[in-house]
Amino acid sequence: MTHEHRHLLAKVMAEGFALDDALLFLDTHPDDEAALSYYQERQEAYRLAMQQYEEACAPLRMDALPPAPCHIWACSPWPWETEA
């Protein structure tokens, strides 16, 4: 995994954590407008981070797999088959 791929994955994970944290706060504070706004911002940031990672690296979710006659991981070289 390249430095760029690690950076993009770390961004996805950080945005996912922030999104989960905002959801937990909204469970106990459902009428907090600032929290709802923050949640919506994090939701968009998470979507963009996922999109950036998937465009640069590979799908992270099953529903993001492109239509193909075989699964992408079965058709692509395995990590140890590519040059470092």
Image (tube, rainbow, N blue to C red):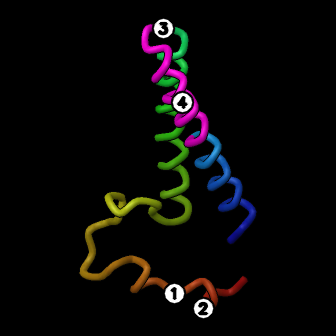
Image coords of residue 84 (percent x, y): 73, 82
Q: SS at mark 1?
A: loop
Residue occupying the point 35% across, 63% down: 62
**Residue, disc 2:** 81
Q: CA distance from mark 4 to mark 1?
A: 34 Å
Q: Secondary structure at mark 2?
A: helix
Q: Which of pointers 2 and 4 lies earlier in the amino acid sequence? A: 4
Q: Nearer the viewer, mark 4 or mark 1?
A: 4
Q: Which corner quadrant of the image does residue 69 belong to?
A: bottom left
Residue 5 picture location, percent across and down = 65, 61
Q: Earlier in the sequence, mark 4 or mark 3?
A: 3
Observer-side mark, 4 or 3, equals 3
Q: Please tell me whether mark 3 or mark 2 is closer to you in this view.
A: 3
Q: Nearer the viewer, mark 3 or mark 1?
A: 3
* Residue with the mark numbered 3: 33
Which dot, 2 or 4, sits closer to the camera? 4
Asked if the magenta segment contains residue 17, the reply would be: yes
Q: Residue at x 32, y 58 (%)?
A: 63
Name the kind of residue labelled 3 in the image: Glu
Residue ID at (32%, 66%): 66
| Highlighted range, magenta | 16-33
Distance from Cα at disc 3 to Cα at disc 2: 50 Å
Main secondary-structure element of the magenta-colored stretch: helix
Q: From the image, tell me which residue sits under label 4.
A: 42
Residue contact between numbered discs 2 and 1, judged by CB atoms under 8 Å: yes
